[in-house]
Image: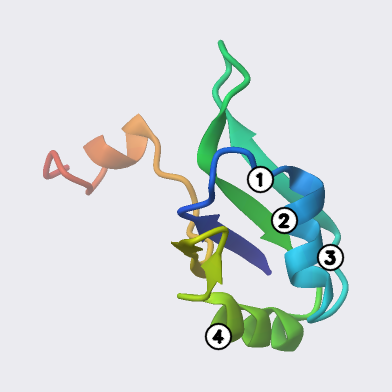
């Protein structure tokens, strides 16, 4: 399962993000999303956990939990929307 982790403090790195989730099970990927031009954190990351049950426990436990004085926003990641999606039944009424 791919997990979205938002409201991260901008100095949190991928290793720290991985550590947050490893206490709940196997983590195959943990990646902080960064701005292309500057390399600065965008304040959110993605975590992949192969076991859905472990992932659900991690989501339930970490969502709303304080990390570096900020409440985390943790949920199952939704597929990214594209401009094409907006024209084919999205916001523009396709």
Q: In which quarter of the image is the N terminus?
A: bottom right
Q: Residue at x 58, y 24 (%)?
A: 40
Q: Residue at x 50, y 42 (%)?
A: 43
Q: What's the distance in space between the residues labelled 4 and 2, CA to CA? A: 16 Å
> Could you tell me if the residues under marks 3 and 2 are in contact, i.e. CB atoms within 8 Å?
no
Q: Residues within 10 Å of mark 4 (few under 14, many from 20)?
A: few
Sooner in the amino-acid sequence: mark 4 or mark 1: 1
Labelled disc at residue 60 = 4
Q: Quadrant of the C terminus?
A: top left
Examine the rendering and report whether any part of residue 6 can be seen: yes
Q: Work out which residue is located at the far top of the displayed protein and give it.
A: 37
Q: How crowded is mark 1: few (under 14 residues within 10 Å), some or many (20 or more)?
A: some
Q: Which residue is denoted by mark 1 in the rendering?
A: 12
> In the drawing, does residue 57 fall left or right of residue 54?
left
Mark 3 vs mark 2: give the one in front. 2
Q: Helix or strand or loop: what does disc 4 sit on?
A: helix
Q: In which quarter of the view is residue 61 placed?
A: bottom right
Q: Which residue is denoted by mark 2 in the rendering?
A: 17
Sooner in the amino-acid sequence: mark 1 or mark 2: 1
Q: Which residue is drawn at 64% across and 52% down?
A: 46
Q: Work out which residue is located at the far front of the displayed protein and give it.
A: 69
Examine the rendering and report whether any part of residue 49 can be seen: no
Task: Pick the residue in front: 83 or 77.
Answer: 77
Give x and y (percent) for residue 62. Answer: 58, 77
Looking at the picture, does residue 55 appear above or below residue 48? below
Labelled disc at residue 27 = 3
Sooner in the amino-acid sequence: mark 4 or mark 2: 2
Q: Helix or strand or loop: what does disc 1 sit on?
A: loop
Sooner in the amino-acid sequence: mark 3 or mark 1: 1
Q: What's the distance in space between the residues labelled 3 and 4, CA to CA? A: 16 Å
Sooner in the amino-acid sequence: mark 3 or mark 2: 2
Give x and y (percent) for residue 52. Answer: 71, 81
């Amino acid at each position: 399962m791919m997990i979205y982790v938002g409201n991260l403090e901008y100095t949190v790195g991928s290793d720290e993000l991985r550590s947050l989730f490893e206490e709940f099970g196997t983590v195959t990927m943990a990646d902080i999303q960064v701005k292309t031009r500057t390399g600065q954190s965008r304040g959110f990351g993605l975590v992949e956990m192969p076991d859905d049950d472990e992932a659900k426990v991690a989501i339930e436990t970490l969502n709303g939990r304080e990390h570096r004085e900020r409440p985390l926003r943790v949920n199952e990641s939704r597929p990214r929307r594209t401009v094409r999606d907006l024209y084919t039944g999205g916001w523009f009424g396709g």
